[in-house]
Amino acid sequence: MTNEFLVSVADAVIRDPITKAGIAYGKANITSAFNLSMSSQDVRAGINNPLIYSYYHTRELGVTLSQAIFAETFLALNVGGTVQTGAVNVLQTDCIVLSSSGSGVLSSTPIGNVEVFLPDGTVQTITPSVKNITVTGANNKMVNAIYTTSKMANQITVETVKPPSIVDLTLIAEIRSSDQTTVKKYLQINIPRFQIAGNYTLDLAADGVSNETLEGRALATTSSDCTTGDYYAKISYIPVTESIVYSNIAATPSTIYWPKATAQSTQITVSGIRGGIYSNTNITSECTFTRVGTTGSGIIVGSTGLISTSASAIPDPTTIQINVTYPSGSLVDYVMINVT
């Protein structure tokens, strides 16, 4: 028996929750955490106050991602904004060695005055002539000029009331087995509606690089069918090379009753059975359907499990067996057709 291990960190795919257009693809994550929690209300009664019932409620699903690569995406998602590209006013700093007359040329065109920091710690406010400045008493000195200029840049505005973004988040991680070094399965966690928490810290250190963190909680997604309730996420275990192994198959209906001389058509549905906590799987498209013998030649056995005939081809009262195999005969069930 081999054991399976979930290794390293997950890649993160962030998409628009409605259009599914790509927003970010994180492949340089340092940590990726998936946390599922619930609260409970205990009911106790009787002598010594024993626990007789526990009501679990307020299920939450949280995710935290930390990446080494610095980009605009994480900040924009945290503030619920977009990255605007265009001409913006930015602060420019120039180190200039002035001439013998105290004049120098800036690297960009200032908007407004220029603040010049002299070596002795004093500051002069200079009105430039286009890019040229002249500083009194600073002949042949090295100065630092600080001013506002216009440049093409990406810009994010942190608004006061705008909430963080809601995105479609998918985590993809590797599952490896103890007897092999290759990936055996992929774990894929899809959260259709992930609400970013809006908590963002940018730590800068002299001896390191900054990491960015994205955290938040899943919002409920309305189910699209009548059997599954509203949900936070869908978690898939995707085998790389192995197919899913079933212990048995079940074809339904097991018996079909057809009146003679009446056109009929019935679709056979095949379920793959794994047992335990695993639900049955519809594997009809992976099965083959074969009529046993030559009786009932007027009945057409379709490759997809559709059994049909016209009124003129209905045989005399008889019993016809249809073998259902998955795959290559390793698992077999059968359907009986009774023509009356």
Image (cartoon, rainbow, N blue to C red):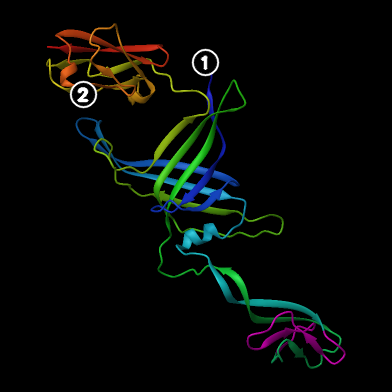
Q: Find the magenta span and give its range.
A: 98-125
Q: Residue furthest front?
A: 312
Report the predominant secondary structure element of the magenta stretch: loop
Residue type at mark 1: give it: Met
Residue type at mark 2: give it: Ser
Q: Which residue is painted at 59% across and 20% down in the image?
A: 179
Comparing 238 with 100, the one in front is 238
**Picture quadrant where residue 300 is located:** top left
- Whether residue 197 appears in magenta in the rendering, the answer is no
**Residue wearing tag 2:** 265
Q: Which of the image's four quarters has the C terminus?
A: top left
Q: Position of residue 246 (x, y in %)?
A: 39, 18
**Residue wearing tag 1:** 1
Comparing 147 with 192, the one in front is 192
- Whether residue 118 appears in magenta in the rendering, the answer is yes
Q: Is residue 96 above or below residue 43?
A: below
Q: Position of residue 117 (x, y in %)?
A: 74, 83
| Left or right: residue 296 compared with residue 160 | left
Q: Which of marks 1 and 2 precedes in the sequence?
A: 1
| Left or right: residue 114 compared with residue 233 | right
Q: Residues within 10 Å of mark 2 (few under 14, many from 20)?
A: some
Label 2 sits on a secondary structure element that is strand
Label 1 sits on a secondary structure element that is loop
Marks 2/1 in contact by CB < 8 Å: the verdict is: no
Disc on res. 76: none
